[in-house]
Image (spheres, rainbow, N blue to C red):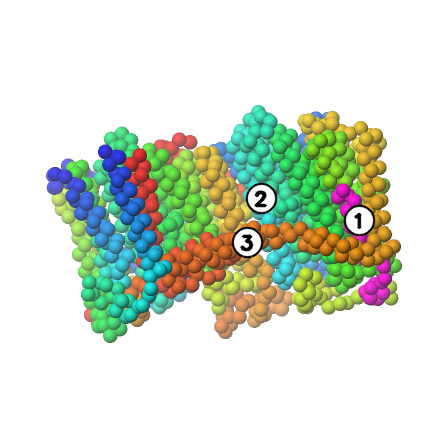
Amino acid sequence: MSATAWGWLVLAFPLAGTVVISLGWRALPGRMAGWLGSGAILAAFVCAVGATVKLQKLAPHARHASSTLFDYAHSAGINIGMSIYVDPLSLFMALVVSGVSFLIHVYSVSYMTSDRGYSRYFAYLNYFVFSMLLLVLAGNIIILIVGWAGVGMASYILISFWYRRTTATAAGMKAFVMNVIGDVALVLAAFLLWRHAGHHVSFNGIFAGSKQAFGTNNGTLIAACLLLTVGAFAKSAQVPLHTWLPDAMEGPTPVSALIHAATMVTAGVYLIARFHPLYELAPTAADITAGFAAFTLFYAATCALAITDLKRIIAYSTISQIGYMMLGVSTGGYDGGLFHLMTHAFFKALLFMGAGSVIGAMAGIQDIDRMGGFRKSMRFTYVTFVVGALALASFPPMSGWFSKDEILGFDVHRGGYYLVLAIIGFAAALITAFYSFRMVFRVFHGAAVPEAQSLERGELAHGEHLNPMTGEHEDTDVGFPGAEHHIAEREWPMKFAMSILAVLAIIGGIVGIPGVTHWLRNFLDPVFADSKFINTQPTDTSSWIGLVVGAGIALAGITIAYVCYIRQPGTTGRIAARVPALQRLFVNRWYWDELYDALFVRPSATLGNFGRYVVERAFVQGTLVGGATRIVGVGTAIARGLENGYIRAYAVLMLLGFGGLGLYFLLQAAF
Amino acid sequence: MTTLLIAAAKAPVIDYKGISPLFAVAGGAVIVLMAALIRGRFAQRVLVPFLTVGALGAAIGLSIWNWHTGDSRPIVEGALAIDPLALGLSLLFYITGLATVAFAWRSRALRESGTGEFFGLMLGSIAGMTILGSAENLITLFVGIELLSIPLYVMCASDVRRETSLESGLKYLVIGSVGSATLLYGLALIYGATGHTGFAEINNAIGNSVNLTDPLLLTGIALAAAGLAFKASVAPFHAWTPDVYEGAPTPVTAFMAVATKTAAFAVILRFFLEALVSAQEQWAPALAALAVITIIVGNVGAIAQNSLKRMLAWSGVAQAGYMLAGVVVGTQLGLQATAFYLAMYLFMNLAAFGVVIARERVSEHGDGLKSLEGLGSASPLLAWPMTIAMLSLAGFPATAGFIGKFYLISAAVDGNWAWLGVMIVVGSMLSLVYYLRVIAVMWMTPLKIELPGRPRRARREVQPVAGWSPEADPRAQPEVLLVTLIMAAATIFFGIVPSPLFHLAHDVGTSISALFS
Amino acid sequence: MNVTWYLVLSAFIFAMGAAGVLTRRNPLVVLLCLELMLNAGNLALIAFSRMWGNADGQIFALVVMVVAACEVVVGLGIIVGIFRRRIPEDVDALSELRG
Amino acid sequence: MLKSYFPVVIFILLGAGVGTAFTLLNNVLGPRRPNPVKREPYECGLPSEVKRNFRFGISFYLIAMLFILFDIEVIFLYPVAIQLKALGTFALVETVVFIALLLVGFVFVWRRGALEWR
């Protein structure tokens, strides 16, 4: 069986899972749907492994294959096949996605048990994995867009999974719209390339075409690359398109682990890595991207300092970590970026699972100010969470240590502008180490809160259900969200998933130890063989120096956190009191949402009112023009104001339109 | 004057094979009218609809029989001609007609106005569309437009006990007549400038005997463009659309939304790409401007509409803008893209309207957005088609709408109208706001009451109906449900395997030879 | 002879009809004004057909007459229907549908 | 010759601009002291709104409409009449078909009872 055949199977299993579950959900008893979904993903993972084995047998330069199922759109001018492209990069992504997704499925099997929408949930989850795999295996940019949009849709329905929460549906909408901005940018980029790079849609065709169509830093190419960047940023929640990710935490915790930490948000990184030849042709675009990434990783880290909602802290840390990956792939450190993508998938999913377990123990409360002292009562969660936090803080010898510092080491090696970016990265690393252990100490150490004590006595706390955002009561009779909570200590599937991820988070680094193992680099090299950075790798000694520095920073951050939260608790309070402005800035996430409000929402609203007023005076004479939404208030107001029901007004409109046309043509006659 | 007439006279040559579809429809109209005179429930409920379906089926068969790739032959002395463009588009009319029969079968409008009258008028209107699709001549163009419109005016008002229905009828009549008068004056001026009524002759005259900047010609084009833009509800000639769509009986609305728009674009394609193609530099920029205005106005107007019919009307305006972009390009690719999009447009809209019809008969909210609340779990068989239709209208990948938009955009980009392509993308992004709202209402609103008389296991629920009407179950209107499901399935199918339609579209594209590919 | 004056006259009639449609409230009068607009088209057609010396324009004009008649009849029918509903005979009263 | 149209364009622009400007100003600035007579639109003495008690012969309208239709349709026979010789049998067939169609319409109207005077 050829590699591509395996590739098709990778796609087939999740799709089959979706169909079976969504059609046969009435017939599936108990946790059957969950196990079915997990099985499908496991099968996909196995097939991905099969494809990899098949591919590795070939000579390095021949390690790519594409296969077309049928002609998707074949006609004059356009020729798109429904095809997949299998090479080390896409397989790497497929392995990470399907592997981590499988573990998260297993975790969900018990985490979602008491939820009425159990089967619906797994149907959605499988659908998401399918679209994600379609995205990474796509054989041409159009199929990639299809997968891209499918992933956006999946994230929308999963965020608003508990659709009785108004906050959840709102967050879903927000995420979807932000994602659509990215989709539009991506589509435009596709058409730019299609038009100017010789009517190609397949990746290699586009690269070859642009190599001969554009010189270095050609304007069109830069525009295309920036559009790609916008798409990537929207999907990967980078500044300024990041505001949807923290709200996306409205979804169930495993969803946050799956979509908003491990897989979907890394699609942007994959996109840039996939299109690296274009970015190397347009260094300006790459540098702009890198700059934004560096800003993002610092900004998000500072936000994570001040927030007290456990899941949102991890969300911001995700934004920050993806900033690292973006920095890597956009500056040429491809294997560094992808390496970090993999390890991050491990430890961030692990952290979310731990958070889910703790939230379960807290009966749905997510505020870390209310938590504390779970060290004894939740031994297993504690250990795994600490492992995750260490990896996130890039503490040796955790996986995060190797990956993050490979990126930074690479940028230090390139020097100049990139050295500055790298220094920002190191500064953010300090903050990262600090806030990751802020979580550990605030949640697990200190005095045991009532929930923790009751858990030590052996019963799970049962607070009444409140919406963590608005604090309003929720009736659990309808089962969204489920009535009972579940913690890892009592559910073996959760335990299983978390322990495997913990092991991976610890040893995941061995695939790329400088000077010892270069497995990942050797695996990916065929893809990036044409890169001009392929030989600008830092020497082993220098990268070891980088690693040591990183370790020192991590240690420093952890110690500061230890001092602040264990030695003299309340230090942070004093600091916050000392510099209240900074505190406020961080708590309010640097006022991004407010900025949006001031920049876009309010002006259009005022315009809307103005337009409405004028229209009513001029045309409608008091006919009410209501219900205009704020964003497009002005347009809607005018459009509906003209629609005042008077035949006469319509005739006027028509004759005016005709007058305009006639005038245009007469002018043509005159000149 | 008599001498003139004699000079022009000779017995016309008629290709009876080519004109047979038209005969089928027009004859069908007459037969249906006569059958309507038979008293008795059987004749009204069964015979007349059966005859209508028969006529349309015959027309479909004959059109396929006439289909020859790439040939275009006159059938009545250069007054009418058939080619893949005419045949392909008239197939769309007939399919829409069949769907409308199913939609209207249980509707109140039918009881009010009488089955025979309703279906007779519908067939007459379809005959007008067929003429329009194959018009080769200013006179047949005008006759076609009027034969299309006049029955529609009556159909809009056919729910004679409802004031809004009458209002929409009169509005459509008045504004429509202004439109046709404008069109007529434009055609008169074009005839005056060129001295011909045949499209081919006009095209020859322009640029040779007639100056491209002849004010008479240009004013004529402007007036004619305005009249046709009205029929296709292109902004700023769209104002009638939402009111008429909302007021008319929903089956009629569905018929108008799909068939009338298709016919309007058929004639726009023929008129501009056959008769006026040599003046393209003159009209293309104006139409492009209209397309942009239409896309913006349509999408903006659709936001914050609470009546589904109004929302679909506005979205129809926006879609007209997308298709107009395909006309502006003026290449074979553009023609193909427009024809292809028209087919896709049929599937998505009929699916959406089917759901609206099925719901408004049982829901207290009529065609309001509220009537869809909780539909997701009440009757998924209706919720899924609506979801698919909305996603497809919004141009979501892997649906028919995506392929159609993609085709249009690539045509625009290919014909150096890239910015129009960008406008299409922006417009469809804007449209997500209101399409998504519908989906959210269906799947993400809690349900109210248990549906009586259903098995407890299947927790089906509906909006409280005034009393319990058996129609509340979608299965009580199998014909509507069937059509809706078929259309939705087609939307998905051609979204994933569009190649067959691509080939048809390619045939259609080749039928106007004047275009450079 | 020169067709210009016929054209001027027909344009004038067209404008009058349009103005009437815009200003009148009585639907019957509005229908009359629509007739004016259509017949302006007819006049232009006849004049042009005279100018070019071919009969197409005249045939066109005949067709238009019939079409105009049909439109008027349909209009009258709807107006009768409206009157039966006891709605005031006033096009401005027909503004139920809006927004 | 074409340049000569430019003044026309300018004139149209000016006219439209001034007109709209004054209308808008009127709406925005002008004081409103409406009274019934002012509200009444001027329609050359014709009552702009038909009174409720206005006697309205529906049958009369019906007959009138039908008369207009059948009367105007006959126009189509006129060209044929002129061309009868040139067209020959075709003209005959054509006319017969046309008349038959008119008859269909007539039968329909008749059977529907539109001709009874009520």
Name the spot of residue A415 as percent of width and height, x first.
Answer: 73, 31
Between circles 3 and 2, the one closer to the viewer is 3
Question: From the viewer's perspective, is residue B501 above or below residue A630?
Answer: above
Near-viewer residue (A29 or A110): A110
Q: Residue at x 77, y 40 (%)?
A: A426
Residue B43 lies in the magenta stretch: no
Magenta residues?
A427-454
Q: Residue at left 72%, top 55%?
A: A580
Mark number, residue A601: 3
Q: Amino acid at mark 1?
A: Phe
| Three-letter amino acid code at the position of disc 3 | Val
- Residue position marked by numbered label 2 in the rendering: A183
Q: Specify which label sits upstream in the sequence, 3 or 2.
A: 2
Labels 3 and 1 touching (C-beta < 8 A):
no
Please tell me which of labels 2 and 1 falls first in the chain.
2
Q: Name the side, left or right, on which A248 lies relative to B452.
A: right
Q: Label 3: chain?
A: A
Q: Is residue A462 above or below residue A25?
A: below
The one nearer the camera, C5 or B266, is C5
The x, y position of residue A66, in whole percent, is 64, 33
